[in-house]
Image (cartoon, rainbow, N blue to C red):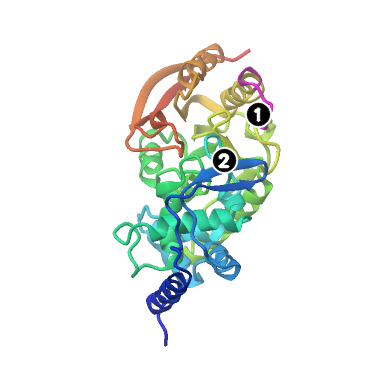
Amino acid sequence: MVTEQQKRIAIALDRIADSLQTEEKPVKRGKKYTITHKGKTLNTNHWYPLTDAECLALKKAYYTKPSSELVVRNLKKIADGGTQVAHITNYFVKDLMAKVKLLSPRWSIEEIFESNDLIRYFWSRVMSSEKVYPPHKTDINNFETALRLSGGGVAMKPSNFPMKSIDQILEQYNVNGKYYDFSCGWGVRMLSAMKNNVEYFGTDPNYMLVGRLNSLHESYNNVNDTKNKVNIKCSGSEVFHAEWENTIGVAFSSPPYFSLEDYKIGNQSYTEGTTYEQWLEGYLTRTIQNIHKYLVSDGLFLINVKNFSEYKLVQDTQRIAKANGFDRIDSILLKNTTRPSAKDDLNTNEIVMVFKKTINSN
C-alpha cells in the first residue's frame, strides 16, 4: 500500500523532473503574482503550480469529517473531564467556521477554497520549509498549518473558546444550575455545561449552527448515557424570550467584537454597513437588558470583551451594564486567549468582567 508520504515524494520528484526539462523553478521567488478573487487582490511572491485536481483534493481533505469512532472517543473524554475538542469541532462545525469572514484578512477560509490560485499560494508556503511543514505529515495537516501561520491578511479561521476557562467559570460562579450563553459560539460552552451537569440555555442567530449544536447535544447524551438539558433559541440575544425571565443563575458568553467577525448566516448583530453606535444600541444594550430580566435576584452576568482598534468595548460594556442594573464585582484573566487578527493587540491576555444584578433596569 502506498503511503501518503510516498505519494508526496513521487509528486515532488515528478515536478523536479518537469522543472529541469523546462529550466524553470516551480516557485518563482523573484516574480510577483497577482491573485484576484471576489474583488480583492493579493500581490505575492508565493505561488506553486498545483494542478486543478490537486487543489480539489486539498479542498476535499479540508472538509472531510473525522470518523465516528474518533468523535465518540472525544465525547467520552469530555464527559470524563477532558478539555480537548478537536474531533468534535471538526465533525460538527468546521465547515461553518470556514464561512466566517474576519475583519483583517481579505477572505474567509471557504473563499480560499473557491480559488485554486489562493490554494496554490498557501501550498507555496508549505513547500517553503520542511522544518515547519515536515514531509511526514499529511498534505492537509501542513496546509492547515500554513493557514494558521501565514493567514495574516489573507484568510484565518475564527477562534474557539478554551474549555478550561468555561469549566472554571461554571465552577466558581454557578448560582442555581442554570446557565445562559448569549452567543453560542462553536459548542465548547455547551459541552462544558453538559459535563458539569449545568442546564444550558443559549441564543444564536446562526440557524445552521443551532441545528448542529442540537445534534451535538443529542450525540453527547447518547454516547455518555446522560440526560443533560439544553434549550437553544435560534435568535440574537437582543430578542427577549419571556419564558426565561427570573430563571437564570449565571449568564456568560464571548460575543462578537462588533465588526471583527462577520458570521454571515442568520440575522447577525453585525452586517456590512452597521455602525458601532448602532451595534451598541441595537445589540449590546438590548442583550444586557434581556440578561437582567433573565437573571434571578442574585444572578451574575459575565462577559469576555476586549478593546480593539478605536472601539472601547470594555468601557462601553461596563457603562451600559451599570446603566441597566449591574455592578461590576470581579474580573477573571484569560491567559493566551486570542481572536484571529493581523492586529498584535488582540493576541494577548483577555479579561472576563463579572457583574452582579443589583436593581431593576428601566
Q: Residue furthest left?
A: 131
Instruction: Tell me the crowding category of disc 2: few under 14, some 14 to 19, or many 20 or more residues within 10 angstroms, Cα based.
Output: many
The residue positioned 48% from the left and 17% from the top of the image is: 318
Question: Disc 1 on helix, strand or loop?
Answer: loop
Q: For residue 140: magenta? A: no
The amino acid marked with disc number 2 is: Arg
Sequence-wise first label, 1 or 2: 2
- Identified at 64% across, 31% down, the residue is 270
When the figure is inspected, residue 328 is found, relative to residue 181, above or below; the finding is: above
Q: Residue at x 50, y 47 (%)?
A: 32
Q: Position of residue 204 (x, y in %)?
A: 62, 40
Q: Position of residue 152 (x, y in %)?
A: 46, 41
Q: Can you tell which quarter of the image residue 39 is in?
A: top right
Q: As displayed, is residue 325 above or below residue 15?
A: above
Q: Amino acid at mark 1?
A: Glu
Q: Which residue is mark 1?
A: 238
Q: Is residue 168 above or below residue 296?
A: below
Residue picked out by circle 2:
106
Q: Which residues are magenta?
A: 270-278
Disc 1 to disc 2: CB gap under 8 Å: no
Q: Nearer the viewer, residue 45 or 304?
A: 45
Quadrant for the C terminus, please. top right
Looking at the picture, tell me which residue is in the foreground, 263 or 22: 22
User: Does residue 291 appear to the left or right of 272 in the view shown?
Assistant: left
Magenta highlight on residue 277: yes
Q: Position of residue 277 (x, y in %)?
A: 63, 17
Between 104 and 160, the one lying in front of the other is 104
Please say whether residue 217 is visible from this viewpoint: no
Q: Describe the element under mark 2 as helix, strand or loop.
A: loop
Q: Residues within 10 Å of mark 1 (few under 14, many from 20)?
A: many
